[in-house]
Image (cartoon, rainbow, N blue to C red):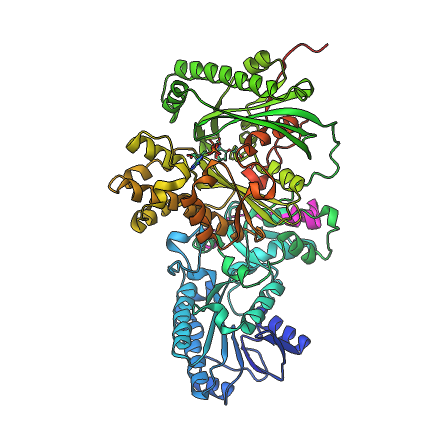
Amino acid sequence: MRIIVTGATGFIGAALVARLQAAGTIMIDGAAMPVSRIDIAGRSGTPPVDITDATAVRALVGAGADIVFHLAAGNTPAGEADPAAAAAINLDATRHLIDAVAASGHPARFVFASTVSVHGGAVARSLATEADAPRPATTYGATKAAAELLVADAGRRGVIDARIARLVSIIDRPAPAAGRDAPVSTVARLAEVLTGPPAGRAAVLPVRVDLRFAIADLASTVDALIYLAGLPAAALGGDPVLALPSTPIRAGQLVDALRRAAGDEAAGLVRIAPDPAVEAVIGGWPAAQDWSRAAALGFPAPASLDDIAARLAGRDLPPAMRPDAPLIAASAEQGIARRRPVWAVGLMSGTSLDGIDAALVETDGVDIIGFGPTLFQPYPEALRADLAALLGGTAPVIAAARAEAALTEAQAATVTALLAAAPEIAPHVRLIGFHGQTVLHLPDEGITVQLGDGARLAARAGIDTVSDFRRGDMARGGEGAPLVPVVHRAMIAWAGIPAPVAVLNIGGVANLTFIGSDGGLLAFDCGPGGALLDDLMRRRTGLTFDADGGTAASGRVDDGVLARLMADPFFDRLPPKSLDRDRFAGALDLVAGLSLADAAATLAAFTAAGVARGLSLAMAVGAERPSRVLLAGGGRRNRAIAAAIAARSNLPVAPVDDAGLDGDALEAQAFAVLAVRAADGLPLSYPSTTAAAMPAPGGALHRAALAR
Ligand SMILES: Nc1ncnc2c1ncn2[C@@H]1O[C@H](COP(=O)(O)OP(=O)(O)OP(=O)(O)O)[C@@H](O)[C@H]1O
Ligand SMILES: CC(=O)N[C@H]1[C@@H]2OC[C@@H](O2)[C@@H](O)[C@@H]1O[C@H](C)C(=O)O
């Protein structure tokens, strides 16, 4: 294999050449091929080759090569200072290379190192996908975007075999050499936070701590470029643009990682002094790049920020001290002092307002020992209507108080009925987990309201009762939801389902839980569940729901309406995040002009599109690709929704019931476990499940009787 590398004396290029030389072979279409010759072009090579000069490039390419890695480029500050020079190196040199390869008559694999900063505009600060139109906010990004078009077009013409890699900020770069002529890159200024202090140098973090951007490490990026060169052309399916694997972080995590890797003293050497110019550049980039396509093609995840920081600090952290990947904390439960398992009742009345699910579970709060009987009791219609009238929060307090009393009495009756049906378990029940009815959920304001009088239920049932589960999390900056994910993990373990796996609950709202192979969790609400469809059916037919999705399955999806619904900024927000039941209530107006069947089909597709988006967001923030998605909640019975999810998600999808769990009672069972956790002071939520600042306790315990 003859390989040409431009930018070979630069930061990435030098590492790439060293890697190719050390390996001596390169995998091409699955076979190891010898690297017989590497020709390099770079500013300081011997001899230096100026690739902005067409003649020099033609001499370099000569009779042709098997692979061209085109890495030479200016950086962002250089582009702002001298746009003409940026165009010469980023654009003209690319054109010369394409022309020279075309002239050689041998369509080399042409790996072009592009950048996430081709994005900007609407996707600045949110998640960018390969499908988003480039809207660069810098000359560097603009010249790279233009070069991408030239490379792709040459690929289309067949004169090169085009492969375009979008790279992010490679954070493990050494400090720039003193006295160098080019402006210091924006990323090098960020990297100094990790490299300076361990060596005793003071460093400045030039941006605010909550600014988000994506990072990767040098080794994984070099490996990714080599892997991309070796993929069969067909693997890219005619679209040469690929977002490389990356990890989205907040700038402050650089300092956190430094502290864990090098200690408080090193972290004390960092001064946070936001520089508007640097903030403007990074703030114009997307906060994250969707690399699910790369993941599906087998590209591995980059090193975690903690591993990078530890390596730069000159030591590797012992496994026990290693916090998990930046966002997805393992939320481990080793070392927890177990209590004796108890039987608990869980009560869930979800956002769909259909009624009360009750379940018996034997658990120590960490593991599930076994499941007992379950029971569903629909709300009486009058109570349902009273609760529905409270949604939105504008009804008088007296109405809320009366509804709360009524729903508590109804749930007490459900407990009585459940225990009557399980006489052998009833005497052993120690606790009730009483979720109550969510009537308002405003995470941005730190407000969530679950109606349910725990004191009254404890007194009625004669069993200690935990209620008010969500405010402990919100008090610690969390979204207040979802809370079930930690129990999803226990259920998966109980059922012997191998991780990585995802659980999708389709209730009134839909929420996703990702359980990694190390037990790490990522969870969030991903969009509407069945509540919109229920509301549509009530409005138009008087029926309470679309049984088995029959109406939705008979209609046609209005793609225009669906696109407008999916344009909601919620779908670009990175997880964790949560939703109010009526967050997308405007959808009912948007489908008002459609026939009942088409409106139902479009709302079912909306639920599925939210799930698909959630799956790609999760991959983008580093969740492992689940081996399958297990469906829970009443909405799994809607076959229009289930089929659309299977069609859009590219993953095997199955009801949790197939894996031995109970998709109807699952949330009620979860609140039995959460009650035991609450009573024992175990966390209900984690930074990676609700964005709480720390693993958070929650729940209020109401005693049934005085302590003896
Ligand atoms: N047979 C069915 N066919 C279609 N949809 C169904 C069926 N049974 C239930 N659903 C839908 O499932 C949803 C309710 O599911 P579930 O009871 O799990 O939600 P919830 O617990 O009330 O809500 P959440 O999980 O958001 O708190 C409703 O939208 C309902 O219409
Ligand atoms: C505020 C609220 O009640 N949220 C519910 C709702 O319904 C589904 C989804 O949105 C989930 O986030 C949550 O419920 C489940 C039980 C949870 O907390 O895990």
Quarter of the image for residue 668 reads top right
The picture places residue 583, in percent across and down from the top left corner, at 39, 36
Question: Is 62 or 196 nearer to us in this picture?
Answer: 62
Task: Answer above or below: position of 168 versus 635.
Answer: below
Location of the C terminus (image quadrant):
top right
Question: Is 520 or 84 nearer to us in this picture?
Answer: 520
Q: How many labels does the image show?
A: 0
Instruction: Say whether residue 629 is magenta.
Output: no
Q: In this view, does 312 lie to the left or right of 348?
A: right
The picture places residue 517, in percent across and down from the top left corner, at 65, 50
The picture places residue 84, in percent across and down from the top left corner, at 39, 71
Question: Is 312 or 579 nearer to us in this picture?
Answer: 579
Q: Which quadrant of the figure shows ligand 1?
A: top left
Q: Is residue 262 left or right of residue 130?
A: right
Instruction: Say whether residue 274 is magenta.
Output: yes
Task: Answer above or below: position of 428 versus 263.
Answer: above
Query: What segment carries the magenta color?
Result: 257-278
Q: Which residue is drawn at 58% across and 38% down?
A: 485
Q: Which residue is drawn at 39% across and 41% down?
A: 549
Residue 245 seen in the current view: yes
Task: Answer above or below: position of 521 versus 315.
Answer: above
Residue 694 seen in the current view: no
Q: In this view, does 513 lie to the left or right of 581?
A: right
Q: Which residue is drawn at 54% across and 16% down?
A: 412
